[in-house]
């Protein structure tokens, strides 16, 4: 038995003329042109960690940050900012905002929004650094993390955004945008997330997602409105990429160059170059018990009533501590103290559902904030202390106050905060003096340690 012979070829041997019988021809090769995809990997951000025998971050006092920080890291990572941006963008893309961009509430509208989203995402670290800085500057709220009208005006002025010659981007026009961006959604059937936003959202201040949305509105007023086709619906007449290009131009040509170095500063720089160091850990450990007692006392006081458990430190409680130990002066004011608070915190991705975490410091954030005080406030050298005829930093400051020299001293001993992120004075030296002042101011028993008894005694004075 054998398989039957086929009655025709199973290969296309006779499809082309001039091909010998039984020869398999080579068909024409089809060439297709496709858009080139850039596969370049983003540059990795390397962190500077001291290589010291027997000391590692994972075994240091900072270890809990790997569990408690949203980034699950010792730093504010790109991933945690990306998660925050997804939340902020979702909250910004409400129906009215989409309508302003000409993006209907469907798949087509989503595609139109992607270009605008990409333009913002390319400058994400800068956008969030600006929000953190200008919200800390705001004096209308102690809490921070919301930008009031005064701080918003400072931001606009710093970045040279208002244009007197424009029909749409004068300061009064930009003030109206502030009001529009701050409007709450009270429509019927809104989501639970939107309801939570309405509860948290101050009537005259911008939350983070509103700031993101407002940047887009500003870009439209500054670069798009003047180009709208006259007599035609302004939104539908715009080219699809016009708003995205306007956002890119605003951020790269105005916001980026306009932000001062301190406003554009990364919290991780100080951590990399100074804070995460075995010598700094030794300074903290010398006062470890006292620092825990101080943190617990002021957090438990719960001046703001925001922490449900009363074990987290708010900005208001942080400022109260600084007043009690007399560290605030004409150079280190409430403004600088709030910046220390903001930069010491690890980045929180969800400003609504993690609000308590966003507006409070953990114990390790508290330690970092104390270290950051030294990047604003000048502490005397040993030689200056001896020259005043005293033996410690607290007595030095007391002598300045007694002699009426404190204001002059504070204003003439300025500290370069940007330089102090990497260089400047040795942190272990100035941090040790800062902690000594705090302990001496609160030590009622005179034993050099802070306990509950010291705070009980302070109530009797």
Image (tube, helix red, strand yellow):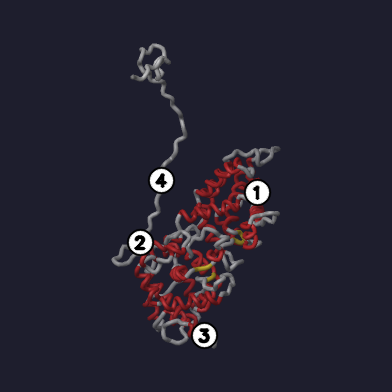
- At x 48%, y 75%, the residue is 295
- The local secondary structure at tag 4 comes to loop
Quadrant including the N terminus: top left
Residue named by callout 3: 456
Residue bearing the label numbered 2: 49
Inter-mark Cα distance, 4 to 1: 35 Å
Q: Residues within 10 Å of mark 4 (few under 14, many from 20)?
A: few
10 Å crowding of disc 2: few (<14), some (14-19), many (20+): some
Q: On screen, 315 above or below 257?
A: below
Q: Nearer the viewer, residue 408 or 130?
A: 130
> Which mark is first along the chain, 4 or 3?
4
- Residue at 39 percent of width and 51 percent of height: 44
Inter-mark Cα distance, 2 to 4: 24 Å
Q: Earlier in the sequence, mark 1 or mark 3?
A: 1
Cα–Cα span, label 1 and label 3? 55 Å
| Helix, strand or loop under label 2 | loop
Tag 3: Cα neighbours inside 10 Å, few (<14), some, or many (≥20)?
A: few
Q: Are marks 3 and 4 in contact (CB under 8 Å)?
A: no
Q: Which residue is mark 4?
A: 41
In contact (CB < 8 Å): disc 2 and disc 1: no
Label 2 vs 3, first from the N-terminus: 2
Pointer 1 residue: 95
Q: Is residue 440 left or right of residue 199?
A: left
């Amino acid at each position: 038995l054998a398989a039957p012979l086929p009655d025709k070829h199973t290969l296309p041997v006779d499809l082309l003329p001039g091909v010998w019988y039984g020869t398999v021809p080579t068909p024409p090769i089809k060439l297709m042109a496709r858009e080139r995809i850039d596969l370049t990997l983003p540059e990795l951000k390397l962190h500077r960690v001291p290589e010291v025998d027997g000391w590692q971050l994972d075994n240091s006092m900072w270890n809990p940050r790997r569990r408690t920080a949203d980034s699950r890291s010792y730093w504010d990572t790109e991933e945690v900012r990306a998660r925050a941006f997804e939340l902020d963008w979702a909250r910004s893309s409400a129906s009215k905002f989409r309508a302003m961009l000409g993006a209907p509430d469907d798949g087509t509208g989503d595609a139109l929004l992607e270009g605008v989203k990409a333009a913002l995402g390319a400058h994400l670290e800068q956008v969030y650094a600006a929000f953190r800085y200008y919200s800390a500057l705001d004096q209308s709220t102690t809490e921070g993390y919301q930008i009031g009208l005064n701080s918003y005006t400072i931001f606009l002025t710093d970045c040279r955004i208002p244009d007197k010659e424009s029909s749409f981007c004068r300061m009064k026009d930009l003030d109206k945008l502030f009001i529009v961006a701050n409007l709450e959604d009270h429509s019927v059937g809104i989501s639970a997330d939107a309801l939570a936003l309405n509860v948290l959202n101050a009537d005259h201040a911008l939350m983070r997602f509103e700031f993101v949305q407002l940047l887009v509105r500003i870009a439209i007023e500054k670069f798009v409105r003047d180009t709208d086709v006259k007599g035609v619906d302004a939104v539908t007449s715009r080219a699809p990429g016009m708003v995205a290009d306007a956002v890119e131009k605003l951020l790269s040509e105005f916001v980026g160059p306009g932000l001062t170095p301190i406003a554009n500063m990364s919290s991780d720089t100080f951590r990399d170059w100074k804070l995460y160091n075995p010598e700094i850990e030794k300074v903290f450990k010398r006062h470890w018990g006292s620092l825990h007692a101080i943190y617990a006392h002021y957090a438990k006081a719960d001046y703001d009533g925001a922490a449900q458990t009363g074990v987290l430190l708010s900005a208001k409680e942080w400022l109260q501590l600084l007043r009690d130990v007399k560290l605030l002066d004409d150079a280190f004011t409430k403004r600088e103290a709030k910046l220390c608070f903001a930069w010491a915190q690890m980045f929180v991705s969800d400003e609504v559902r993690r609000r308590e975490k966003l507006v409070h410091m953990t114990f390790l954030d508290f330690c970092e904030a104390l270290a950051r005080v030294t990047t604003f406030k000048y502490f005397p050298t040993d030689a200056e202390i001896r020259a005043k005829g005293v033996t410690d930093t607290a007595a030095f400051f007391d002598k300045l106050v007694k002699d009426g020299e404190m204001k002059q001293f504070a204003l003439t001993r300025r500290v370069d905060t940007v330089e102090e992120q990497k260089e400047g004075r040795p942190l272990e030296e100035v941090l040790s003096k800062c902690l000594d002042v705090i302990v001496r101011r609160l030590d009622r028993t005179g034993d050099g340690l802070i306990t509950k008894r010291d705070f009980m005694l302070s109530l009797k004075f």
